[in-house]
Image (cartoon, rainbow, N blue to C red):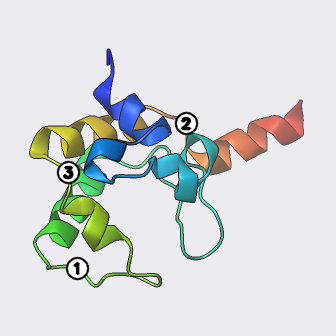
Amino acid sequence: PDDPGAWLATRGNWQKNVPACNQCHGPGGIGVGESFPSLAGQQAAYVAGQLRAWRQGQRPPGPLGLMPAVATRLTDAEIDAVAAYYAGLPQAAARQTQGAQQ
């Protein structure tokens, strides 16, 4: 794929049993409820750091315990790519505000 981060975010990698991030975190990574926070507009270093912490068992698994299993299936390059993809998206709050003004 041309943009591996966008591919992982929107399609996943089913050969490695990695679901699309957007399946849980919502379209464009806007977040869904309490368990799936917004990824859109987060700093790439923050997202990558959290994924690596899950992969290394240094972060609690979270409410549903899904992320450690997903993170262990991602390479460093995939983590960096998907983190950069979400960093480049507008934040969910900014998008909602813009939508209300139109």
Residue 3 horizontal side relative to residue 23, left or right: left
Report the amino acid beneath label 1.
Arg
Label 1 sits on residue: 59
**How packed is label 1: few (under 14 Cα within 10 Å), some, or many (20 or more)?**
some
Earlier along the polypeptide chain: callout 1 or callout 2?
1
Label 3 sits on residue: 74
Q: Nearer the viewer, residue 2 or 42?
A: 2
Residue 27: image quadrant is top right
Report the amino acid beneath label 3.
Leu
**How packed is label 2: few (under 14 Cα within 10 Å), some, or many (20 or more)?**
some
Report the amino acid beneath label 2.
Pro
Earlier along the polypeptide chain: callout 3 or callout 2?
3
List x then y, in percent, for residue 63.
46, 85
Q: How many marks?
A: 3
Quadrant occupied by the N terminus: top left
Which residue sits at x=29%, y=43%?
Answer: 15
Q: CA distance from mark 1 to mark 2?
A: 26 Å
Q: CA distance from mark 3 to mark 2?
A: 24 Å
List x then y, in percent, for residue 61.
32, 81
Query: Do the CB atoms of the residues marked 1 and 2 lie less than 8 Å apart?
Result: no
Residue 77 horizontal side relative to residue 10, left or right: left
List x then y, in percent, for residue 5.
33, 33
Q: Between tags 3 and 2, which lies in front?
A: 3
Label 2 sits on residue: 90
Helix, strand or loop for disc 1: loop
Which residue sits at x=61%, y=52%?
Answer: 26
Quadrant occupied by the C terminus: top right
Earlier along the polypeptide chain: callout 1 or callout 3?
1
Helix, strand or loop for disc 3: loop
Helix, strand or loop for disc 2: loop
Query: Do the CB atoms of the residues marked 1 and 3 lie less than 8 Å apart?
Result: no
